[in-house]
Amino acid sequence: MLFILVLSVKITRWILKNIPVKYFNENEINISSKCLYLVYLHLVVSVFLFNHEVILIILLSVFYNLIVSLFIIDIKIGYLPDVLTYPLLWIGLLYQTCASQGNVVSAIYAVVVSYLSIMLITTMVEKIRQSPQMGRGDFKLIAACAAWLGLMDLPKFFALAAGLGCAYYGGVYLFYRHKTITHIPFGPAIIISANYWLFFLLINS
């Protein structure tokens, strides 16, 4: 467990320093190791508490490495890099094939349904309001997280993500009420919702 904890912190720090510079021409993101250790500690402990298969522990550890990095990058610079979201999707499908309660067919349907439904809804809203509503990186992140959850948990996943996103928007609007808000990252709400429901599934599996 200690090895995975230390490795996760090192990998995340490397991702935050290199990906913003290489793919978005942004400054590297510096997060203290202490903060990352605090974040990963309870995540890694939860993985070991509810899993005894080595392959699942590895896959879930990768899941947390990817979502923590995506969470921080979206908050800091407003991007969700494909180089992280695509692996998240494929590893989610692999997780579904390895987990005893997994269903890779359900996961594939979840990926397709989640991506198409959110794209359709967003496109309709954009045509009505004549302004961008959600980044395409959010679509990919939703599909990637859906691969980990499966088709039947999509409604709960969407509902919690939407609720968290609205709450975050409301808080930002109240705090910056005298300023124009041009962009609010939705990635963190998606990630928190996916993490919550995946953890819920682990407890009840």
Image: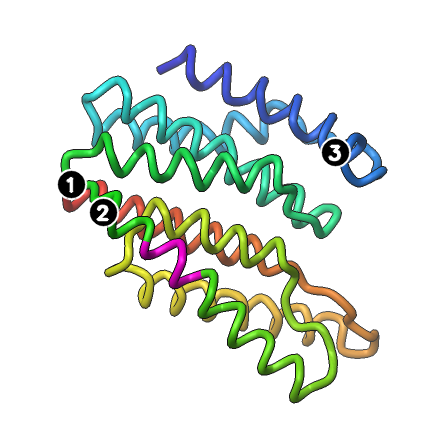
Spot occupied by residue 197 in the image (x, y as percentages of width and height): 31, 52
Left/right placement of residue 146 relative to residue 87 reads left
The residue drawn where x is 24% and y is 34% is: 97
The three-letter code of the residue at mark 2 reads: Leu
SS class, disc 2: helix
CA–CA distance in space, label 1 to label 3: 37 Å
Answer with mark 2 or mark 3, whichever residue precedes in sequence.
3
**Residue 201 in magenta stretch:** no
Task: Give the residue pinned by disc 1.
Answer: 101
Q: Is residue 19 left or right of residue 51?
A: right
Residue 118 x, y percent position in the rendering: 49, 68
Which residue is found at the position 80% from the left and 32% from the top?
A: 21
Kind of residue at badge 1: Gln
Residue in the foreground of this view, choosing between 73 and 138: 138
List the residue tagged with mark 3. Answer: 29
* Region of the chain picked out in magenta, as a range: 109-114
Q: Earlier in the sequence, mark 1 or mark 2?
A: 1
Q: Give the image location of residue 154, x and y in percent.
A: 33, 62
Quarter that holds the N terminus? top left
- 1 or 2: mark nearer the eye: 1
Identify the element where label 1 is drawn: loop
Residue 97's place in the image compared with 154, above or below, is: above
Please report contact status of discs 1 and 2: CB closer than 8 Å, yes or no. yes
User: What amino acid is found at the position of numbered circle 3 in the picture?
Assistant: Ile
144 w.r.t. 23: above or below: below
Residue at the disc numbered 2: 201
Q: Residue at x 53, y 40 (%)?
A: 86
User: What secondary structure is the stretch in magenta mostly built from?
Assistant: helix
Secondary structure of the residue carrying tag 3 is: loop
Dot 3, how many residues are within 10 Å of its Cα: few (below 14), some (14-19), or many (20+)?
some
